[in-house]
Image (cartoon, helix red, strand yellow):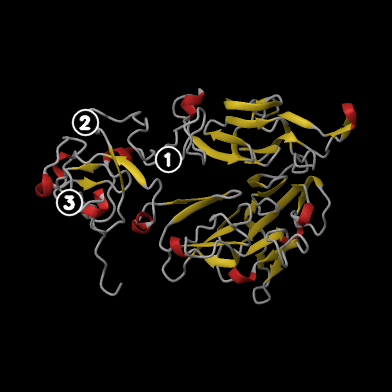
Amino acid sequence: MSSRSTSTEPGVVSENAPKRLTPRMLGASKGVVFVHAAVGRSHTLLVGSNGDVWTAGANALGQCGHQPCPEVSSFTVMRGPSSGGVKEKIVKVGAGITFSILLAESGKLYAVGSGEHGQLGNGRTGEHIATGNKTMFDVYSDPVLVKGLEGKVITQISCGHQHTIAMDKDGFVYVWGYNGYCRLGLGNQQDVLIPKVVPQVSRGISFRSLPGKTKSLRAIHVSAGPSNSIVLDRQKMYYMAGKWKNSGEGSSGSPFSTFRFIQDIMGCKIYQTCSGGVTHFALAPDESDGSVMTIGFGQNAANGELGFGPSEPKSATKPTRHQPLLGVDVIDIAASQNTTFFLARPNEKLSDLPRHPALVDSPDECVVCGKDKGDADSPLECDKCDFPYHLGCLDPPLAAVPDGEWFCPRCSAKPGRPVGSDVDDTDGFDEESAAPPPAKKRGRPPKNKQMTPEDEDGDTEPKGRGGQKRKAPEPAKAKGE
């Protein structure tokens, strides 16, 4: 877990040295792992494989599922919902600004937080006049059942700032909450207090050439942005409702009042979507080679959140293929107000991308023997942490430099471990067999580029440095590639 700040202020976790958090640290039984998570504007929910939910952050309106207070300063397990006296097992969560949604294994939905715009889905806002002539609304810190879904088994949920979109096992889509800019896709701007089904994705079209066969327009995926909602139907068409850009159709002056498909990506078989502050992303297969195609767009994106590169425009009104991610096997995307995270499987293309942090603490000598044997036995460098190992010091030893990417025992054992030798991530790792010597900070050269003395020290002569570390070479391409 990390924040964007690089401050050393107590309580601030830098992205350069994220801290690991496990359910065991929060009091869970051995074997429990995190299976889902959600982040609102100022609060976070974590779901364990045992069905428990831990929350932290702003809680003035009970959105963390605890008695209202300014904040829950550390992750605390919330008292989960029950049905018929039996505790429900939570499997997924969603978070808005002032509310949270819990999806139980049974397919039922529960909500906590403020009901101001009907985002709790329980049929009421609880609007009333309080002391000082202030207008107040219902606040629930204990989970309440989302109504109107009796007999339905919900499988997906996604929360915007003040609304929710959900899908059941049959592909029917439901929306509720704040409906400004027609974000619910129901043709009006009236807030919805109990989930309503979206008519467009709840019908079928018969094939004329195949009597009795129906081509369903029901959904396979739903997601919510700050002021928009997205549905993918079974043809993998991308539909959007609400406000999703700042001018023209789809803006505040002309929002999509109902779900409309985005023509620019009609030919793509979209299977994953998400929206950030002003950005929108989608994943689809590249039919030419079977790789993952990452698509991004966002009018007035100004902070590099599209990630198109420093020499490219920061914003894009129309869907655009993400060129820096060509060949990168993106698994999932998380977009927020001004930041985007891409989760990808390791491959050569991913390793070629610029890394962060640019400066990495890693030793110059083999971390096992602590020696620099010069060019006669230059060490192999891990593609993630840059820690060097002599081939013969590995267990089992390597006879030659392997093809493709190579990861050291530390990174192989813990793929998610933070980069940097100053991070305490020794749990379960045998430090006696591979204890790194004191680290020397340096920049990492671009992959496949020979490091020169000028790159290394800024001088024309190397200073006290022996053999050059080596990376695993790229696999040889087959003829015709």
Q: Which of the two residues, 115 or 12, is positioned nearer the viewer here? A: 12
Figure disc tally: 3
**Disc 2 from disc 1: Cα separation:** 26 Å
Quarter holding residue 97: top right
Kind of residue at disc 3: Glu
In terms of sequence position, does the residue under pointer 3 or pointer 2 come before the other? 2
| Element type where label 1 sits in the image | loop
Q: Is residue 389 left or right of residue 168?
A: left
Kind of residue at disc 2: Ser
The numbered dot on residue 433 is: 2
Q: Is residue 339 left or right of residue 201?
A: left
Of the two numbered discs 3 and 1 in the rendering, the one whose residue sits closer to the viewer = 3
State the residue lying farthest toward the bottom.
209
Which residue in the protein does label 1 denote?
16
State the residue lying farthest toward the top.
27
Q: Is residue 90 left or right of residue 383?
A: right
**Disc 3 from disc 2: Cα separation:** 34 Å
Q: Which of the two residues, 272 or 98, is positioned nearer the viewer here? A: 98
Q: Residues within 10 Å of mark 1 (few under 14, many from 20)?
A: many
Residue at the image position 40 percent from the left and 40 percent from the top: 416
In terms of sequence position, does the residue under pointer 3 or pointer 1 come before the other? 1
Q: Residues within 10 Å of mark 3 (few under 14, many from 20)?
A: few
In terms of sequence position, does the residue under pointer 2 or pointer 1 come before the other? 1
The numbered dot on residue 461 is: 3
State the residue lying farthest toward the left.
376
Kind of residue at disc 1: Asn
**Disc 3 from disc 1: Cα separation:** 31 Å
Of the two numbered discs 2 and 1 in the rendering, the one whose residue sits closer to the viewer = 1
User: Whole-percent x and y of residue 298?
Assistant: 61, 61
Residue at the image position 52 percent from the left and 28 percent from the top: 11
